Image (tube, grey):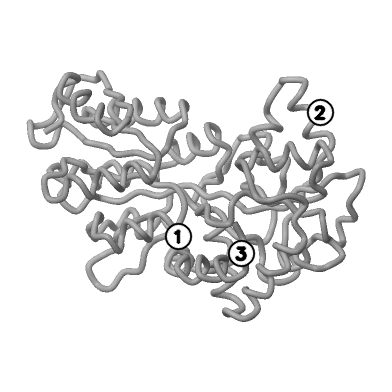
Amino acid sequence: MLSTKKSLFAIVSAFGLTVGLSTATPALSQSSQVLNLYSARHYQTDEALYAEFTKQTGIKINRIEADDNALLERLRSEGKNSRADVILLVDAARLWRAEIEGFFQPIQSKVLDAKIPKNFRSNDIGQGSQWFGFSSRARVIVYNKASMNPSNIDTYEKLADPINKGKVCTRSGSHPYMLSLIGAMYERQGEAKTEAWAKGMVANMARAPKGGDTDQIKAVASGECGVALTNSYYLARLMRSTKPADMQIVAKVGLIWPNQTTSGVHMNIAGGAVASYAPNKAAAIKFLEYLASDSAQQYFADGNNEWPIVKTVKTTNEALNKLGSFKQENISIASIGKNQIYAQKILDRVSYK
């Protein structure tokens, strides 16, 4: 068991990971008073989320943080010797990859089944779902208000129209955020139409794909790009900033909820699962159920500008509320994750870097 700071730091130093240890006094038996959390979430506001869980349950959290790829590599290396109880990952593509590699185990929880919509959890083939979404984000379109006509870019499909040649920017097509969007398109309209769209996107690029989502927003504001794709929380983060430079960026860009008269906005998730060889399975399930609680859902919304998955939870995040309501895509996140293989093949064929 990962029981001391010394042993934890010794283990993770070889992997370039960071460790967080809660300090609450355990209140349960030795086998259930600790939770070993492997997390790809790297938001400082999650500290309060974990602290509240320990306060409520007495279960101390040993936390290892790294990006998704590093965590998956660690799990491969550890195999059956892994001490992970809960694994938190970001994006359907990564959750699906971890599922097919056998890193999760199915669980049965009436709490999670009641609170987490079916399209935001893995398929249940009789033993329970293997992973659950706990917060959501939308893949939105941002545009330069001075140079672009919103009616020409109000769907994902229109971004590939020749009218937008030399105006489009995205991050790398092989990034999970893009793979999931393309996986959703593949699910909705099939391979041929999705490939034609990807080819049109390549033809319309203002420059080669590079940077992260915030970089796309900045490039639109500067005029380097006319239009770009970004996850909603990156824009909301800039909207909440009091830095003059960020405020100037927000003033120059407009937001479009794509496909409002057709399929709706592509949604993705951050999610969690009980690890395959979890030594503290009961505590792990309790933690996942806690993530579906009203208070935890509010932490996701207020801390990282994500929408709660639980429909009854109302957010007080002013930036999210200012973005307004919108029609969401109704596609199983599990299907989107599975389709990433086809999405990558399409990208390779059209040289979408």
Residue 131 picture location, percent across and down: 34, 56
Give the label, 3 or 2, closer to the camera.
Answer: 3
> Is there CB contact under 8 Å for labels 1 and 2?
no
Residue located beneath label 3 in the image: 351
Neighbor class of circle 1 (other Cα within 10 Å; few <14, some 14-19, many 20+) is many
Residue at 42% across, 53% down: 133
Residue at 31% across, 69% down: 124
The image quadrant that residue 187 belongs to is bottom right
Residue 164 picture location, percent across and down: 83, 60
Q: Which mark is residue 248?
A: 2
Please identify the quadrant where the N terminus is shown: top left
Question: Alpha carbon of mark 1 to alpha carbon of mark 2: how far?
Answer: 35 Å
Please identify the quadrant where the C terminus is shown: bottom right
Question: Alpha carbon of mark 3 to alpha carbon of mark 2: how far?
Answer: 34 Å
Q: Which mark is residue 181?
A: none
Residue 181 picture location, percent across and down: 58, 61
Neighbor class of circle 3 (other Cα within 10 Å; few <14, some 14-19, many 20+) is few
Tag 3, which secondary structure?
loop
What amino acid does circle 2 point to? Gln
Residue located beneath label 1 in the image: 120
Tag 1, which secondary structure?
helix
